[in-house]
Amino acid sequence: MNIRLILVVVIVCLYGFLLKPWWGEYKEQNQEINIQETQISAIQKELKKLREQEAKPQSNDEVSIGKIPKHNEQEQIIRDIERIAEVSGFRFSSLTFNRGIEAASNAKKVNINISLKGPYDRLFFLLSSLQQNDRFIGIKDLRLSSNIKDGTRNAAISLSLFALHQE
């Protein structure tokens, strides 16, 4: 009888101290795995969609050219870049323009060279904002240096950009 009682106590203790905590961890890990599988599935669907779009490029060049502004609007370009830089916390060191022609689309382009200084942690926001601007601004070249001053990491960036126009 004593052996059965001791055996029951040992089993209850094993359950309470080993199996029950392990079961909670198992449930948490299983939930995390399910979340990650769902995220992977969503990413795979998006990747499949992007591959399909890449395999079927637009054949209608007029649609693409229609998105390019008619006129060279340097003043508007300057305002857009200044606004984006200001919102990103950057300030201008220099800004220059020159003209060219985009061989692939036969559109005219304005080449823009700018130098900016600002907080390093806002750099990707600046670049993303430039590329998402309503007026298409492409980034040709980027040079970056950084330094730490007063415990803050700062960036000095030189960008070669271009903006297309039709006339």
Image (spheres, grey):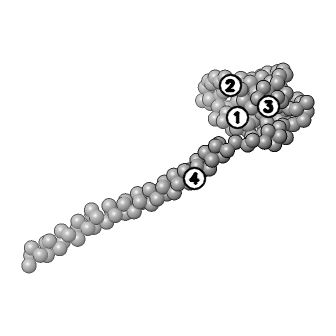
User: Residue shown at 37%/63% (left/top)?
Assistant: 24
Question: Which type of secondary structure does the marked residue at label 2 adopt?
Answer: strand
Disc 3 marks which residue? 105
Q: Position of residue 34 (x, y in %)?
A: 46, 59
Disc 4 marks which residue? 45
Q: CA distance from mark 1 to mark 3?
A: 24 Å
Type of amino acid at the residue the image marks with label 1: Leu
> Mark 1 or mark 4: which comes first in sequence?
4
Image position of 111 (left or right of 24) = right
> Mark 3 or mark 2: which comes first in sequence?
3
Q: CA distance from mark 4 to mark 3?
A: 32 Å
> Mark 4 or mark 3: which comes first in sequence?
4
Type of amino acid at the residue the image marks with label 4: Lys
Q: CA distance from mark 2 to mark 4?
A: 32 Å
Question: Which type of secondary structure does the marked residue at label 3 adopt?
Answer: loop
Please report contact status of discs 1 and 2: CB closer than 8 Å, yes or no: yes
Question: Which type of secondary structure does the marked residue at label 4 adopt?
Answer: helix
Type of amino acid at the residue the image marks with label 2: Leu
